[in-house]
Image (spheres, coloured by chain):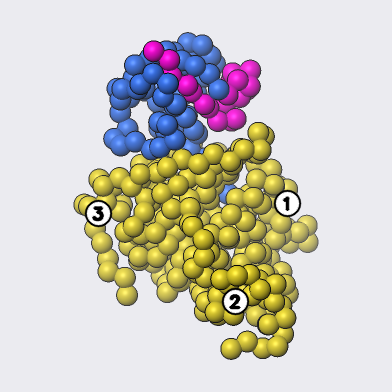
């Protein structure tokens, strides 16, 4: 059931063939865990909030810094020094009061991740490091919930969607590859594109429309304004989602 | 035997912005070694001391991931090898 105001707010997406009020209802009931409120997290949060997601649980342990502002569009100069989750919640709450915003200002670790994700329906990867991404991927597989991966560097970005037990996971793709922990170059337009792709995938998954970026890695090269797509074959020996991986039954 | 290589724009500064090139080799290893022979500045980025692809890079053959990752995997004439950097920012 929608209020008259909700029907007006979401009128243009309800009009989309295959979306309808039924699709809007699915969005309204959905609970999203967003890991990161930075360059990727900002557009993901903005567009999921605009679309009327039910609950957005945002986890980020950082405070806003001046060097964030070239790309983290949820945060402004007046927010420097404040917790990112608080800055994000304040803006998103004004943007769409109908969305429930939950904030977690904790570092995501192996010890707390299951508790932080809780009963969320899916996980969005808006992280800035690989180890936590691998942890999110593993948790999604263990909980049996989808994982929406995104990453950026300079003018290049990537996205992939993981459906546990069905499609290739992040470990099938990278096999635990590591990179040196150092600050990375990035311009705002790159996470803007990738974050919007991730938000699009989330919406499509929840509403049940279109084809997801499963078993596919979408690579965006903004310098050449080119999208490449790589087929990602699920690795049967993947230690996270493969035959030998330990499983926890989804509730 | 000739293999087509495409590298990420991230590597453009090491190749004079040449991102598509042909290399000679029968295996992934031989092709990567010919790649760094043509573009020596790439060598320290891509290959470790044993001549293997460094852990922060990955490759696809004809647009697909392959398992297991084996530097001695054979390639055919006309195959396409994409080399990507494992990106981590957000």
Chain seen in blue:
B
User: Which chain hosts label 1?
Assistant: A
Residue to which mark 1 is pinned = A69
Q: Residue at x 35, y 65 (%)?
A: A144
Magenta region: B1-19
Q: Quadrant of the N terminus of chain A?
A: bottom right
- In the displayed structure, does residue B16 sit left or right of residue A250? right
Nearest the eye: B10 or A113: B10
Nearest the eye: A53 or A79: A53
Q: Is residue A100 above or below residue A228?
A: below
Q: Residue furthest top?
A: B37
Residue B33 visible, this orientation: no
Residue to which mark 2 is pinned = A20
Q: x and y percent of residue A241 in the render?
A: 30, 53
Mark 3 or mark 1, earlier in chain = 1
| Distance of label 2 from label 1 (alpha carbons) | 36 Å
| Distance of label 3 from label 1 (alpha carbons) | 41 Å
Q: Secondary structure at mark 3?
A: loop
Q: Is residue B44 above or below residue A161?
A: above
Q: Is residue A199 above or below residue B37?
A: below
Q: Secondary structure at mark 2?
A: helix
| Palette colour of chain A | yellow
Q: Quadrant of the C terminus of chain A?
A: bottom left
Mark 2 or mark 1, earlier in chain = 2
On the same chain, marks 2 and 1? The answer is yes
User: Which chain hosts label 2?
Assistant: A
- In the displayed structure, does residue A31 sit left or right of residue A194? left
- In the displayed structure, does residue A48 sit left or right of residue A95? left
Residue to which mark 3 is pinned = A245
């Amino acid at each position: 059931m929608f209020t008259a105001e909700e029907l007006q707010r979401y009128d243009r997406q309800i009009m989309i063939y295959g979306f309808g009020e039924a699709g809007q209802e699915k969005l309204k009931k959905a609970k999203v865990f967003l890991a990161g409120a930075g360059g990727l997290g900002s557009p993901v949060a903005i567009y999921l909030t605009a679309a009327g997601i039910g609950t957005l649980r945002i986890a980020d342990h950082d405070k806003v810094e001046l060097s964030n502002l070239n790309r983290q569009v949820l945060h402004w100069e007046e927010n420097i020094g404040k917790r990112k989750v608080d800055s994000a919640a304040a803006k998103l709450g004004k943007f769409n009061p109908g969305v429930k915003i939950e904030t977690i200002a904790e570092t995501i670790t192996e010890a707390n991740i299951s508790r932080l994700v809780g009963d969320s329906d899916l996980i969005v990867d808006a992280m800035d490091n690989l180890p936590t991404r691998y942890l999110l991927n593993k948790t999604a597989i263990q909980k049996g919930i989808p994982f929406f991966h995104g990453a950026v560097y300079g003018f290049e970005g990537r996205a992939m969607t993981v459906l546990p037990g069905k499609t290739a996971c992040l470990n099938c793709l990278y096999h635990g590859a590591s990179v040196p922990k150092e600050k990375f170059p990035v311009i705002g337009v790159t996470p803007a594109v990738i974050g919007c792709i991730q938000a699009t995938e989330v919406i499509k998954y929840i509403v049940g429309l279109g084809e997801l970026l499963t078993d596919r890695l979408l690579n965006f090269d903004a310098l050449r304004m080119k999208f490449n797509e790589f087929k990602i074959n699920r690795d049967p020996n993947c230690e996270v989602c493969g035959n030998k991986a330990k499983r926890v039954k989804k509730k | 035997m000739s293999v087509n290589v495409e590298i990420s724009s991230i590597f453009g500064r090491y190749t004079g912005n040449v991102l598509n090139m042909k290399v000679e080799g029968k295996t992934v290893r031989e092709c990567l070694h010919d790649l760094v022979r043509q573009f020596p500045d790439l060598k320290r980025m891509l290959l470790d001391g044993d001549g293997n692809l460094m852990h922060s890079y990955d490759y696809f053959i004809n647009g697909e991931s392959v398992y297991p990752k084996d530097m001695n995997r054979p390639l055919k004439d006309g195959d396409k090898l994409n080399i990507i950097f494992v990106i981590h920012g957000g």
